[in-house]
Amino acid sequence: MNTKANCSGCSACAFVCPKECIKIEYNEDGFLRPYTDEKSCIHCNLCEKICPMERSNAVSLDDGVLYAAWGDVVDLKKSSSGGIATKLACYAVSHGYEVCGAVLDYDTLRVNHKVVSRMDELEALRGSKYLQSNVLNTFCDMFRVLKNSPEKKFFVFGTPCQIAGLRNVLEQKYLLDRVVLIDIFCHGVPTNHLWEKYKNWIVRKMKLTSIGDIKNITFRDKAYSWHEYYMHIIGGGTAYVEHKERDPFLKLFSMGVVNQKSCFTCPFRNKSSADIRLGDYWGNRFKDNEEGVSMVIVNSSRGQEILDAIRDEITITRQDIKDRFGQQHTDYEYPKYYKRSLEMLNDSQFSFKDVVNLYETDYDRFKRTIKNIIKKMLHI
């Protein structure tokens, strides 16, 4: 398989392959991509037919039902947004579903999808992880369980492209009726070159012996503000906390200049293959809220049924679907120095600031700082 330019690394091609000859590995730019063993390939073209970037049953978000929602105080404190993902996961486990979502493996500091079935295991799935998750092994295992155990059912959380690819395979194998799909408003996934460089940097910054000393990473700690991003890392008996404008990983991630190419004009920005889409409810409506509000868009009758089932546990109000515009749906320009940025991140002689400086000057940063100070003073 020759990877298409718009490939998102969702892995649908790999877990539908009848010969299991497609592997998912990092490419030279630091993104998970499919690689085919041509000697084993039988040229059935299932990988082409299943690709969500070419074909999907995604529906327009314009036809969905929009809600603003949030959970209780405990969930709000631990969650990146309004805690609705946690409420849905708890509902799933209590009703016999297994839950599949992204977890950070602290042995490797890489993100993979994992299936859990107990309440005490849900904590690992909580919170944002701004890295590309490898779903292949977990999704393959899930398919085997669905095929061999008719009583099994799953809730799956993922990015829009991962969920679109998964849905294509579930439909092809007639297994969709036992799987609830939940995707997120996605900013995109950054190159692994950024993360590898950052891991080495944080070890030096925190004066750790190795990455093995890191015990906890919160990519978006809202203890200081829901509207701002703070990286919070604990390890080696100390803690590192820094705002997104000063933390090099969050800085480059939020700039969106080192994400994979397919993220810049994502076909699922305004469409979804999921039953429910979740995200932050940004905008003026909740500008004074510091605890977090979830934007919830229901795209199917099954999604509505599940959301209705947790209504007594959350605060929820219906909103005009147009209220999402300008908050969560905008594509962004292809970076002028994209290839150069990826090369610099993969080269130890260049710093994070060298990459940032490709896109903004000290004067740009000064202007933004003054603007933010004025905003806080005027509380607008």
Image: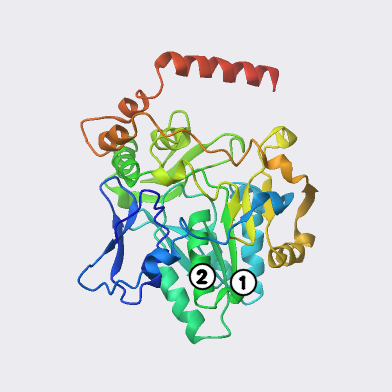
Q: Which residue does the numbered mark 2 point to in the structure image?
A: 116
Q: Secondary structure at mark 1?
A: helix
Give, as a three-letter code, the residue at label 1.
Val
Q: Quadrant of the N terminus?
A: bottom left
Asked if residue 213 is positioned above or below residue 200 in the image, the reply reads below
**Front-most of residues 250 and 238:** 250
Q: Secondary structure at mark 2?
A: strand
Rate crowding at label 2 as few (under 14), some (14 to 19) or many (20 or more) other CA atoms within 10 Å: some
**Label ID, residue 250:** none
Asked if residue 309 is positioned above or below residue 153 in the image, the reply reads above
Looking at the image, is mark 2 or mark 1 earlier in the sequence? 1
Q: CA distance from mark 2 to mark 1?
A: 9 Å
Give, as a three-letter code, the residue at label 2.
Val
The answer to whether the residue labelled 2 contacts the one labelled 1, judged by CB atoms less than 8 Å apart, is: yes
Q: Residue 70, how many percent across, how many down?
A: 71, 50
**Front-most of residues 315 and 342:** 342
- Left of 281 or right of it: where is 237? left
Q: Residue 319, how many percent across, how many down?
A: 78, 46
Q: Is residue 159 visible?
A: no
Q: Which residue does the numbered mark 1 point to in the structure image?
A: 93
